[in-house]
Image: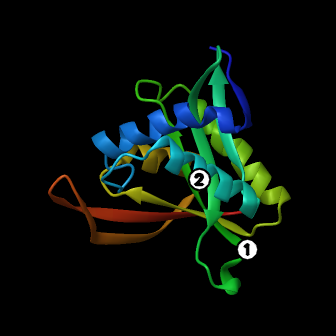
Amino acid sequence: MAVLIRPAEKKDMPEILEINNFEILNSTVNYDYTPKSLEEQTHWFEQKQQAGFPILVAESDGKIHGFATYGTFRSKPGYRFTVEHSVYISNGLRGKGIGKMLMENLIEIARKEGYHTMVGGIDGSNESSYHFHMKLGFKEVARFKETATKFDRWLGLIFVQLML
């Protein structure tokens, strides 16, 4: 499968929404409870664009198979050289290198933009995401117990960091 990594466009929002909502409804990858509407997903896209943050998509045969982005880590100005990222891959397509391609491109953009560090939050039970990030050079910097709830259970959160 030939995969093209490119900047997201407004027309990609229905497919990004489908990926995002699948995770909201079926996993602890995303701690939201309620599926998003197309209007909400489009607003998210517009906010990212206005802030100058990238959203990348992985496309193959005209279909979006994943997306990655980063944004503000914390709102205070002292954090302005740190970004927090997200990467989502379509159900059934994980482990095929799509996430790696998205993240390598996203990391390169962050470096070119002059960011100093990238952080990510991983659900404590998501071993595949943890190992994925370790292979990309991220290091575990914190492990929080029972910081969130979803599906009637407490969830831990692992923070990982990559020095850019």
The circle on residue 43 is: 2
Query: Which residue is painted at 44% across and 44% down in the image?
Result: 37
Nearer-the-camera pick, 123 or 132: 123
135 relative to 3, above or below? below
Instruction: From the top left corner, tell me how far across and down residue 120 is, in percent.
Output: 52, 60
Q: Say what amino acid the circle numbered 2 marks.
A: His
Name which of mark 1 and mark 2 comes first in the sequence: 2
Instruction: From the top left corner, tell me how far across and down residue 142 is, in percent.
Output: 43, 72
- The answer to whether residue 76 is left or right of residue 114 is left
Query: On the image, which quarter does residue 48 sit in?
Result: bottom right
Q: Say what amino acid the circle numbered 1 marks.
A: Phe
Residue with the mark numbered 1: 81
Nearer-the-camera pick, 45 or 83: 45
Name the mark nearer the viewer: 1 or 2: 2
* Local secondary structure at mark 1: loop
- The answer to whether residue 20 is left or right of residue 115 is left
* Local secondary structure at mark 2: helix
146 relative to 96, above or below? below
Query: Which residue is painted at 47% across and 30% down in the image?
Result: 90
Residue furthest left in the image: 152
Instruction: From the top left corner, tell me how far across and down residue 103 is, in percent.
Output: 64, 44
